[in-house]
């Protein structure tokens, strides 16, 4: 891939993300947001975090992309604790502790 192609992709992605953000802040930023949109926006973090974590669990770089029981167990424990307790910090701490324990136990 040439330098021109790389810079073209970078500029196109920059323009795209700017226009997406502008559509919310610039075009409708001064208007009241409908209640159903506010409700949907609350789930943004819930949608983004699993999208960031899932590749690290299913295809971890530490195992050359092969899923391993330590990460899968830690993800399952995090999910169960999060769903049952509805406490994000408890889920993160429990999942991290499970990952370290499983890595120490299994290797």
Image (cartoon, rainbow, N blue to C red):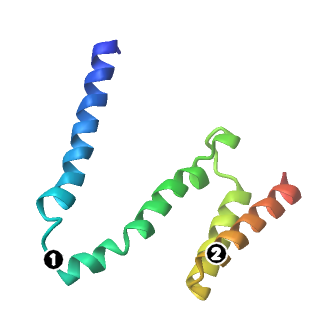
**Which residue is at a point 29% across and 75% down the rendered structure image?**
40
How many badges with numbers are in the image? 2
Which quadrant of the figure has residue 31?
bottom left
The Cα–Cα distance between marks 2 and 1, rounded to whole angstroms, is 32 Å
Residue 36 position within the rendered picture, expressed as x and y whole percent measured from the top left: 21, 81
Q: Is residue 21 above or below residue 89?
A: above
Kind of element beneath mark 2: helix
Which quadrant of the figure has residue 26?
bottom left
Residue toward you, 25 or 63: 25
- Any mark on residue 32, and which? 1
Residue 65 position within the rendered picture, expressed as x and y whole percent measured from the top left: 61, 42
**Which residue is at a point 24% across and 45% down the rendered structure image?**
18
**Of all residues shown, which one is farthest toward the right?**
105
| Horizontal arrangement in the rendering, residue 75 relative to residue 105 (left or right) | left
| Horizontal arrangement in the rendering, residue 6 relative to residue 76 (left or right) | left
Residue 46 position within the rendered picture, expressed as x and y whole percent measured from the top left: 44, 70
Which quadrant of the figure has residue 42?
bottom left
Check disc 1: other Cα within 10 Å, few if <14, some if 14-19, many if 20+.
few
Check disc 2: other Cα within 10 Å, few if <14, some if 14-19, many if 20+.
few
Kind of element beneath mark 1: loop
Q: Is residue 46 above or below residue 90?
A: above
- For mark 2, what is the residue? 89
Q: Is residue 7 above or below residue 60?
A: above
Of mark 2 and mark 1, the one earlier in the sequence is: 1
Quadrant where the N terminus sits is top left
Q: Are marks 2 and 1 in contact (CB under 8 Å)?
A: no
**Which residue is at a point 74% across and 59% down the rendered structure image?**
70
């Amino acid at each position: 891939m040439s330098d021109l192609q790389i810079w073209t992709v970078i500029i196109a992605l920059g323009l795209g993300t700017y226009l997406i953000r502008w559509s919310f802040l610039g075009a409708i930023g001064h208007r009241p947001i409908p209640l159903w949109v506010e409700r949907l926006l609350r789930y943004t973090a819930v949608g983004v975090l699993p999208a960031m974590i899932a590749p690290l669990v299913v295809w971890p770089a530490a195992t050359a992309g092969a899923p391993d029981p330590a990460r899968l167990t830690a993800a399952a424990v995090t999910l169960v604790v999060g769903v049952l307790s509805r406490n994000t910090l408890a889920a993160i701490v429990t999942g991290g502790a499970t990952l370290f324990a499983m890595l120490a136990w299994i290797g």
